[in-house]
Amino acid sequence: MPEKQRILTGMRPTGQLHLGHYLGALENWIQMQHEYECFFLIADYQAMGDHLDDIGLIRRSVLEVATDWLAVGLDPEKSAFVIQSYVPEHAELTMYFSMLTPLNQHQKNPTLRAETAQLESEHQSISLGFFNYPISQAADILLPKAHLVPVGEDQVPHIEYTRDVARRFNRLYGDVFPMPRARVGRVPRLVGTDGQAKMSKSLNNTIYLADDPEAVSNRIRRMVTDVTGENPRLRATDPGVVDYNPAFLYHDAFNDDADEVAELKERYTAGTVSDREVKERLTEAINRFLEPIRERRAWYEEHPDYVRDVLLAGTQRERAIAQQTMDEVRQAMQVVYT
Ligand code: ATP
Ligand code: MG
C-alpha cells in the first residue's frame, strides 16, 4: 500500500463556524478524511495577528472550533486536530521562510494588500505578525509536507504563494517540500445573508452552525433577495429573478428536496409565490440540515474534556512529523553546528 497523501488545512479561532465555512471547506474535509492523512489546524498564531486584544475570544474559540468540527462529522481517529501554537515548529519554519522571502515580493501580495488596506480603513494598526501571515501559512502547509489544501476560494492565492515559497526553498536547498495544490469546495464562496460577496463573521451576515431554529428563522426572514437593488419585489405576483438571488443560492446549496427547489424557482419567475414562502421553505431546509449537527454538538458541549483530549492527541501526532521536517530543513540549510 502506498502511503496516503497528506492534507493540511485549518481555521482561525476567532468565533463560531458558519454555513460559509461548511460549504467552502468542511464539506470537502469530511469526504477527504477517508482518503487522505489529514491535519486540521486551529490557527491561533494567525488569529493573534489581528485579534491579540481579544485573547479571551481566541481561547474560547479554540474549543468552539474543535466542537464544531466534531459536530459536522470530522473523525479525530482518522484525522489530527492540531493547536498551531502547541507545535512551535510552525513558528520555527516561519522564521526560516522569512529569511528567504524578498520583502518587495511579499509587499506585492495582492490578498495581503487588500486586507491591509481594509484594516487601515478601519483605523486598526497592523502588526508585523499579521503582515507575515502568508509566510506563516506557507509554513503551516509545508511543515507536514501536505500535498493538498481544501479551502474556500478566497484562500487560493495563499496556496499559490505557498508554492512559490516551496519552489524557492527546493531550488536553494534541494527537494524537501512537495508542491501543494488547492481544492475548492462545492460552493467556492457563499454569499452573506445581506447579499455581500462573502458570508463572514466580521460582516455580521452569517448563519452559524450552532444557531437554533429561531435564530435561523430570524436570519432568513431578513435575508436580501435582490443583490443589485434593481429588481425590488414588492408583491408575490411580481415576476422574480432567481439568478444570483441569495435565497435561491442557499436553496441550491442546502435544500435536499430538489423538486421543491425547482418548483419554487418556476413559481418565483412566474410571480406565483411570495418571498415569504420561499424563505419559510428555506428555513425548514436549513433547519433539517442543521438538526443532526446540533444534536451531536450538544453531546460534545457537555463533554469538553473529551474535546480537549482530541486536541492534545492530534497536536502530538503532528508535532512528531513537524520535528522530522525541521531536522530535514536544518540539514538542508546546513544550520547544524555540532
Ligand atoms: P470569517 O470571515 O467569518 O471570520 P474567515 O474566512 O476569516 O471567516 P478562516 O478561518 O480564515 O475564516 O477560513 C476558514 C476556511 O473557511 C477557509 O478555507 C475559507 O476559505 C473558508 N470560508 C470562510 N468563509 C467562507 C465563505 N463565505 N464561503 C466559502 N468559504 C469560506
Ligand atoms: Mg475570520
Image: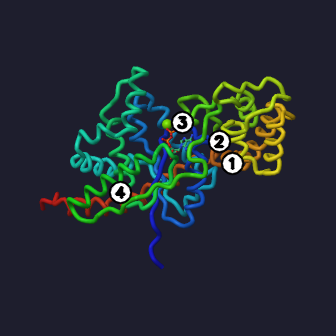
Residue at screen point 26% across, 55% down = 168
Q: What element carries label 2?
A: loop
Report crowding for label 3: few under 14, some 14 to 19, many 20 or more residues within 10 A (C-alpha): some
Question: Residue beneath label 3, please?
Answer: 15
Report crowding for label 2: few under 14, some 14 to 19, many 20 or more residues within 10 A (C-alpha): many
Report crowding for label 1: few under 14, some 14 to 19, many 20 or more residues within 10 A (C-alpha): some
Amino acid on which disc 2 is placed: Leu
Which is more toward the observer, 163 or 34? 163
Q: Where is residue 167 in the image (x, y as percent from the top left)?
A: 29, 57
Q: Reading the chain from its start, which is encountered first: label 3 or label 1? A: 3
The image shows residue 51, relative to residue 63, as above or below, that is: above
Question: Residue beneath label 1, please?
Answer: 293
Q: Position of residue 28 (x, y in %)?
A: 57, 55
Using the numbered discs, state the Cα–Cα distance from disc 4 to disc 1 in whole angstroms: 31 Å
Question: Residue beneath label 4, please?
Answer: 143
Using the numbered discs, state the Cα–Cα distance from disc 3 to disc 1 in whole angstroms: 17 Å
Amino acid on which disc 4 is placed: Leu
Q: Do the residues labelled 4 and 2 touch (CB within 8 Å)?
A: no
Q: Do the residues labelled 2 and 1 touch (CB within 8 Å)?
A: yes
Q: Is mark 3 on a helix, strand or loop?
A: loop
Amino acid on which disc 1 is placed: Ile
Q: Reading the chain from its start, which is encountered first: label 4 or label 3? A: 3
Amino acid on which disc 3 is placed: Gly
